[in-house]
Amino acid sequence: MENAVEVVVKWSGKEYKISNLSESDSVYSLKKLIHKETGVRPERQKLLNLKLKGKPPDDDCLLSALKLKQGFKIMMMGSLEEDIADASSPPDDIPEVINDLDIEEEEIAIESKDVYLAKIDRRIRDYKINMLNEPREGKKLLVLDIDYTLFDHRSTAETGHELMRPFLHEFLTSAYQDYDIVIWSATSMKWIEEKMKLLGVSTHSCYKIIFYLDNSAMISIHTPKYGVIQVKPLGVIWGKFGQYSSRNTIMFDDIRRNFLMNPGNGLKIRPFKQAHLNRDKDRELLRLARYLKDIVHEEDFNGLDHRHWERYRPRKKNKQEAAREDGGGSSGQGS
Ligand code: MG
């Protein structure tokens, strides 16, 4: 008798056991059974770690060639037809980018997924931004989380100032010289406005925030690692404002998965918790202000790895840049 094959498919945070297979069945038969269990059509399935000599096997490849262990776990990416339809019309011209580096595979697959790009398109179209201040020409963009980034929202206190991260206003004042600033929090707009008022951010005279984004500008995605989660896709801002892109945008958040749609543009900061204990020693915002200054001469942020931000050393300024700064008054980006 032929050897029976049993595998487990992980998709959207759940596991599906697939049996009724034998080694003489093809990859396509496996995909049809996965379709039956999950509803994801064979042509929409990406079986991430199913490999033949390092590459995804063809549909007619036999399972015997893959030498799967019993109970082998397959990580799947794939969208249901109704999800794609829900998220407006998916663009046809998005290339599928999947490389063989296992460590990045999941993030890249997510970044290029049609259904998420369609959701972002819908946010670009439908999400209404209430402009507080105008973008300035030649500035880069800084996007900031609130909770645990600028503010300890879990401790109790008499005033907002007790829970505010130390050096918040100094940090924003410094960043504002080179960056337009956006606040993006996974809460409601009402709460964002209240908090910014409470902390004195909305009325400060030394810097301005260009707008706030709330949870309804976020999108939900599913990942094998985290299940269904809400993330903050910078593509929503880039689609609405042509002057900002992955080349000049940086985002701070205490939760790395918020960057999943644009991992290269996120910097995971240390969370500010237990304000009463840490208020006197937390220097994170001072150090981050320094980093923002140090990288401002980089023409393309895609060349930076923010995971190593503390080790970054600015390159020496060239003569032109030095002269421009001596001249003063310039935004630093004019030509
Ligand atoms: Mg946070």
Image: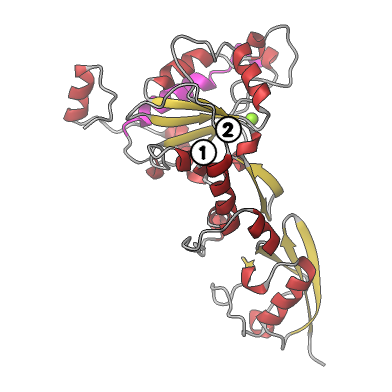
Residue 252 horizontal/vertical position (percent): 53, 32
Left/right of residue 213 with respect to residue 274 in the rendered view:
left
Q: Nearer the viewer, residue 90 or 279?
A: 90
Q: Are marks 2 and 1 in contact (CB under 8 Å)?
A: yes
Looking at the rendering, the stretch of residues picked out in magenta corresponds to 278-297
Residue for point 57% across, 53% down: 118
In the drawing, what numbered circle is on residue 106?
Answer: none
Residue for point 51% across, 38% down: 266
Residue for point 52% across, 63% down: 98
Left/right of residue 332 with respect to residue 116 in the rendered view:
left
Q: Is residue 27 above or below residue 275?
A: below
Residue 232 horizontal/vertical position (percent): 58, 40
Residue for point 79% across, 90% down: 2
State which quadrant residue 164 falls in.
Answer: top right
Q: Is residue 21 above or below residue 16?
A: below
In the drawing, what numbered circle is on residue 266?
Answer: 1
